[in-house]
Image (cartoon, rainbow, N blue to C red):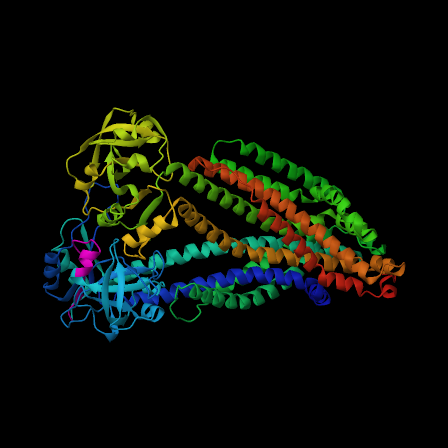
Amino acid sequence: MFRTALRNVLAHKARLLMTVLAVMLGVAFVSGTLVFTDTFGNAYKNKSAKSFDHVSVAIQPDGVPLDSEKQPGRLTDGLLRKAGSLPGADSAIGTVSGFTALADKDGKLVGGEWGTTGTNFFPAKDGKDPRYDFTEGTGPKSAADIALDSRTAERTGYKVGDTVRFSTDGPVHTAKVSGIFDTDDGSVVAGGSLVVLDNKTALKALGKHEYDEIDVKAAAGTSEAALKSSVEKILPKETDAVTGAQLSSDQDEQIEQQTSSMSQVLLIFAGIALFVGIFIIANTFTMLVAQRTKELALMRAVGASRRQVTRSVLIEAFLVGLVAAVTGFALGLGVAVGLQALMNAGGASLPDGPLIIAPTTIVAALVIGVLVTMLAAWLPGRRAAKIPPVAAMNSVHATPTTRGLVVRNTIGSIIVALGAVLLFNDDNYVMAGGAATIMVGVIILTPLLSRPFIAASAPLLKPFGVTGKLSRLNSVRNPRRTASTAAALMIGLTLITAMTVVATSMGSAINKMAAGSLKADYSVSMANYEPLAPEVRQKIDKIPDVEATSPLRTAYGEADGSYTNVNGVDSTTFGKLVGLDLTSGSVDALKGDTALIDTDTAKDKGLTTGDTFPLKFQDDKKTVELKVAGVYENNEMLNGLFTPTSVVDPHVTKVADKQVLVKMKDGASDKAEDSIVKALGENPAITIQDKDAISNAVAGGINMVLNILYGLLAMAILIAVLGVINTLAMSVFERKHEIGMLRAIGLDRAKVKQMVRLESIVISLFGAVLGIGLGLFMGWAVGSSVADAVSTYSMEIPVGRIVIFLAVAALVGVLAAVWPARSAARLNPLQAIKAE
């Protein structure tokens, strides 16, 4: 049977080509993902391990959760001096870090909203900070100095002696570049920028009264364990000592988690591509079995058992899968290199390192390729075993029976009915399961659905005359084949349409939310929403055209046993700037020790307007008794507890604003925005957004994610296109006798090509219409869950994009038919009509 299977594979190389390509692309996606994430993780581990070379023991605050009454441990200068003077300690340095916006020479923000980190220069006994290897100049010595990492210096064109502008909490500062350095700091390894200030300036600018961490270096001959024991004796409350080895191990674990998450996302889409490939493989082997009915029947006639026939087909699938897996793995190495180049092009600056090809990756590629192919070929193999020996006397290919379709349609209908029942459940997860169940049922029912769709296409095909009619009849001749081909395209378009519907609806919901929640014309914040210094609002208040401003000053507190966000606002102006939907009370009543609470909080605590409740802040000072000034409907854009800033300020370490809401006398305009920009010193660190800009920022993020998902699904769509080509090509071979007869009675080559093209378009549009319909349904199902969390959410159908999807599907049909149509037109009529 092995020799027979091998001869069959070699005899049908051309017909198996698309199957090999489909499996190969899926395996390439899987192996490329695994090689890339292994390489990515290994390179980061090697690079980040060097950043702990100067650390024998680190003193850190304990991880205190936001909802804890405990305060983080304090890492003071006194503790630093004690740690540095311990027996066995060579030196100790204190470190701080935080967002620091750096402007390039054109005044634009370097590295985007999250790309730049600021830290301190803490010279050890030798006058050097072991974290930085200066290639030019020296470390900063005063507030007038700043140092840049070499990649940032190269990207911006800054040199030693140049003046730069930076900001940590709003106000703009200037300094001269004192030095340029190389570093293994994680923020730079990840593609960000690092700016270094002198220690005193860094503490002040980053709003730190103490250090984030104290790193102690062991003297020669002292082990990390021994030094840790000494350090533990001087630790204050809520602090901990961690060895450098443990820090490195924790970092490795964190990198593994990140790469694992990335790998899982990519493998999900690789799995979708392989799932789509199953339809192509099953179609191919089904058609091969049908074309070899006489051959298989002869095998049965000369003594081959059903099991041997099935085994023969599965051995063919094994050989095809093995070839596809090996070539797919090789192609996957190219995919890994391509992903690395793509990340670098996006600014990630991945560390250099060799490709990591783990044995598990090789095994996974081979096993997945072979198993997927054999699994898809199992059902055709079973059908082959059922061919009776008497079929050897027939001179035509076997035609599919209707019994299997009846069973299939019955099962599909039951599954759809079950999914429909689950849809009416109140639980979102059960409802989502119902939607997925219906999708599975529809896939099973595609042969049944193909008949009415193709019949409905008759008026569109009528202008093409006899070729249009022939293409329609060919499409409906074998419902299973048409369904399998269309299903591959349908799955990709279902996911794409569903994601597009949810993204479009979410963008609209954000627009409604911004329009309904804000009366303010502008929101002013740091680019990455770090706290703003109060002087930012003070500068805005001095603009003549400003009518009102209010800060949103955040804190965290415990209200009657549960923790909540506390927003400090200017009670005299807040009502002019927001559009809270109050069910009781008034914003004007927000004076003194009062608060506005949302309806959920009011319901949970049994509070109404006029009631009082205790609020305890994290600083553990005296509990504040607040009176409910009003209750407002839940709002996703403005949420939490609102109280005057006079209540919040005494309980925060540093007074700072999350954002400042601004209302202009004449509304939003270019002139009004320019006046704010000028008042704040054309600061690149500060973002000024009107309501449209807020909506556009969110929509931009949604569209970016959507485009990434489109790209990840492109492999599944490509495999689906190969499926259309494969089906048409094998159908042409199967029908060569028929095509020869058509040519003999006068159908010219152009008409033959047109017939195949129209058949391809009909199949592609069937898959597209079914996929778009299912996608709209899935989008509705997912949206129903989203609507429970986002009050302004309602389903919106992206008509423009759906039209584009249909047009692309038609184009896919035209392109997929190029090779099969040319093959059909080139058939020699006399050779084709010979008896088989």
Determine the residue located farthest toward the right in the rendered image: 745
Q: Residue at horizontal 85%, vertical 54%?
A: 394
* Left or right for 381, reference 155: right
* Left or right for 378, reference 793: right
Q: Is residue 583 above or below residue 683?
A: above
Q: Is residue 507 above or below residue 575?
A: below
Whether 216 is among the magenta residues is: yes
Q: Is residue 503 above or below residue 733?
A: above
Instruction: Pick the quarter of the image with the N terminus.
Output: bottom right
Place of residue 274 in the rendered image (x, y in percent of width and height, measured from the top left): 57, 55
Place of residue 325 in the rendered image (x, y in percent of width and height, measured from the top left): 57, 64
* Left or right for 706, reference 439: left
The answer to which image quadrant residue 179 occupies is bottom left
Numbered range of the magenta stretch? 201-220
From the viewer's side, name the closer residue of 212 and 385: 212
* Left or right for 778, reference 693: right
Whether 177 is among the magenta residues is: no
Residue 36 visible? The answer is yes
